[in-house]
Amino acid sequence: MPSRVGAGSFLQDVAGSRRMLFGAAVSAAHLRDAALCEAILRETGSLTAELEMKWSHVERHEGQFEFQDADAVANFAHAHQKRLHGHALLWHRSIPDWAMKAGRLQDDWDSIERFVAAMARRYSGVESWDVINEPIGPAEQPDGLRQSAFLHAFGPDYIRRALVSARRHAPRAVLCINEYGIEYNTPEHERKRRGLVQLLAELRRDGIPLDCVGVQAHLDLSQHHHFDPAVFARFLDELGAMGLQVRISELDVKEKDSDGSVAERDRAVAEATRSFLSVALQNRAVGSITCWGLSDRYSWLDVPAGNRGLPFDTDMRRKPMHSAILDALSQRQA
Ligand code: XIL
């Protein structure tokens, strides 16, 4: 029987004792918040820049790299001995305007290569990179791939080219493909799971550099009744069987609405977290949990009365979601 941990424990301490990692996404601007920083320092072992390393942020003007914000996150991580996860090299929603203009990406792999090289060189301490973020399309498409500007410009090979570039420039980093909308037992999520598994299997078959798959896990209370432990466990087995590491990479819980008392809302968020993680952490390939933020004070999610889908509330107090993560971690065999 795995040992239980006290409710006062810190997430990374328990994760570490199970040879796992607990992390959070942060923004440079939020690092000015002392209370948030205190919680980050105590609770996390790894940090992810929420937006600062994205292409549209770093290279707003062609050829002019602006690293200040990404540096702020990287320097903070370094100063406090936190691991750093690089997010995200190719994402269809973070292509700079100049690259989008007039089909500018067509035949211009050089600009992508230059960005990948610049990031890998400057952030050589990054332990892992999301090389491709969200490659699977939301609707029925050939190969299941998203009809992104990358796909239109370079065809499906853009994924291989990016992974090869990333390996060349960051030879020691763990290379990841990160995806959302693959957690629930709905036709849409099932279709995305199939598309992702097919893509990963082809990349593995052809020896393309790839080490890891990130399951974003933006849970959603309006969908959570579709969470089917057997279906999700089977999916994780498929990923693990391909020899890939698996990460829960962007965990948070979107509320349906803000009806109900705070206690009820927090209980529902914690329950969704608990049911999801208890399945995810049973799989040995799953090695880390990253929350997309740590506190409701800074969440990209919103409901009219402020979404409560992260482990700390806006007053930086632990919520039942914190206990749910602790419990799931503590039940993992070391
Ligand atoms: C989001 C950030 O949280 C926002 O602040 C930003 O405006 C847009 O991007 N999936 C991802 C993340 O992979 O990069 C997204 O982050 C959330 C969804």
Image (cartoon, rainbow, N blue to C red):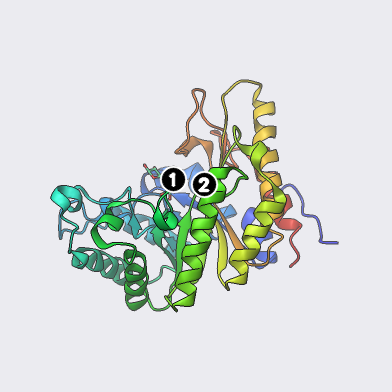
For this view, does 68 lie left or right of residue 146? left
Where on the picture, by quarter, is residue 284?
A: bottom right
> Is disc 1 in contact with disc 2, using a CB cutoff of under 8 Å?
yes
Question: At x 49% / y 71%, what residue is drawn?
Answer: 211
Q: Is mark 1 on a helix, strand or loop?
A: loop
Q: Which mark is residue 181?
A: 2
The residue positioned 69% from the left and 65% from the top of the image is: 17
For the N terminus, give its image quadrant.
bottom right
Q: Looking at the picture, how far across and down is residue 205, in whole percent? A: 48, 76
Horizontal side, residue 59 vs residue 119: left or right: left
The residue carrying mark 1 is 138
Three-letter amino acid code at the position of disc 2: Gly
Identify which residue, 240 or 136, lies in the foreground. Answer: 136
Determine the image quadrant of residue 13.
Answer: bottom right
The C terminus: image quadrant: bottom right
Earlier sequence position, callout 1 versus callout 2: 1
Q: How crowded is mark 2: few (under 14 residues within 10 Å), some or many (20 or more)?
A: many
Horizontal and vertical percent position of residue 165: 31, 73
Q: Is residue 83 visible?
A: no
Residue 53 in picture, x, y percent from top left = 34, 56
Q: Name the element at disc 2.
A: loop
Q: Vertically, is 176 above or below 185?
A: below
